[in-house]
Image (tube, helix red, strand yellow):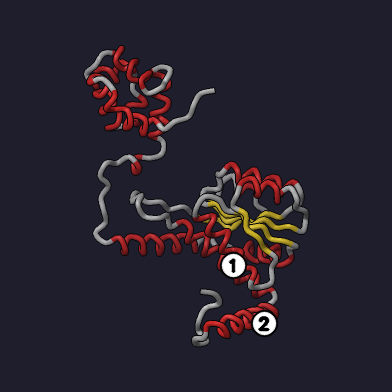
Amino acid sequence: MESSFDIVTRIAERIDQLSLSEQKVARWILADLSVAGAASIDTLAVQSGVSKATVTRFARALGCTDVRELKRRLTQAAAIGSRFLQPRPDAPADSADVVYQDIVSMLQANRALVNMDVIKRAALAVRNAGMVYAFGMGGGSTVAADEARFRLVRFGIPVSTYQDAVLQRVVAATMDQRAVVLAFSVTGQVPEMLTSVRIAREYGAQIVTITALGSPLAGLADHLLPIQIMETDFVFKPSSSRYAMLMMLDILATEVAMLEHARAQELLRRIKYVLDTGRGGDDRQPLGD
């Protein structure tokens, strides 16, 4: 079985151990992975100023069987996008403005995707669920799944959160028609998440997804709350996509509360009472901290 490794990291780690001729090949490749991945062995040799035999030795020195494997790995590495390979990305004059504006733009773009009819049906499914299982994996989706638990428990909704792939499968296998899976994924393409959701569907659970429109996860949804991904070239800033998920979740949670507003209001009153009894403060403090 072919081993998996990051060709860019391996070149960087081993470049000082290569011969001078092989180092020429390494530097030419690192200058443009896309071009190098598409180049023939003759082009690699000519552009690097070395022989074809040197290119072959270079490939083997990196652990590749031959130049063909080297080129394939370079193509895979280049596929992540040049924004992660730029040696000196431009820094913004004010990172606060960049972060703020990206959040605002994200929310504005995703407001247009809000479909209240779908959200109301999803809210009804959540309200009537015997148990809501919030699934999220890997980052912003994990945060959103936990946030779902924080939102829904205030209205007396039985809810739990699962981020581990194995535990997701385990709980999915225990579900029935009374269960609702609330699945969060920015891309909608995480294999482990897709597997868990398919298992849950097989055993009768309703699926509510907050994920990318047109994604594999979106295709599994009974109730789809779509989001739009808007990543920028400034890779050092946290992704603003999670704000779109949180916006959709907040709208969903609000609709859940409004389905039984008298009961929800009483539960919120109790929460406010027990919190303020312990912490003090004025009546405009939030229901949490």
Reading the image, the residue beneath label 1 is 150
Viewer-proximal residue, 246 or 12? Answer: 12
Question: Where 284 sits versus 206, above or below?
Answer: below
Q: Quadrant of residue 72?
A: top left
* Disc 2 secondary structure class: helix
Relative to 104, does residue 202 appear above or below in the rendering? above
Q: Residues within 10 Å of mark 1 (few under 14, many from 20)?
A: some
Tell me which residue sits at (50%, 55%) in the image. Answer: 140
Circle 1: element type? helix
Q: Is residue 5 left or right of residue 134?
A: left
* Image quadrant assignment for residue 96: bottom left
Residue hosting label 2: 266
- In the shown orientation, is residue 74 left or right of residue 249? left
**Toward the viewer: 31 or 8?**
8
**Viewer-proximal residue among 155 and 260:** 155
Q: Residue 81, percent across and down? A: 38, 40
The mark that comes first in sequence, 2 or 1, is 1
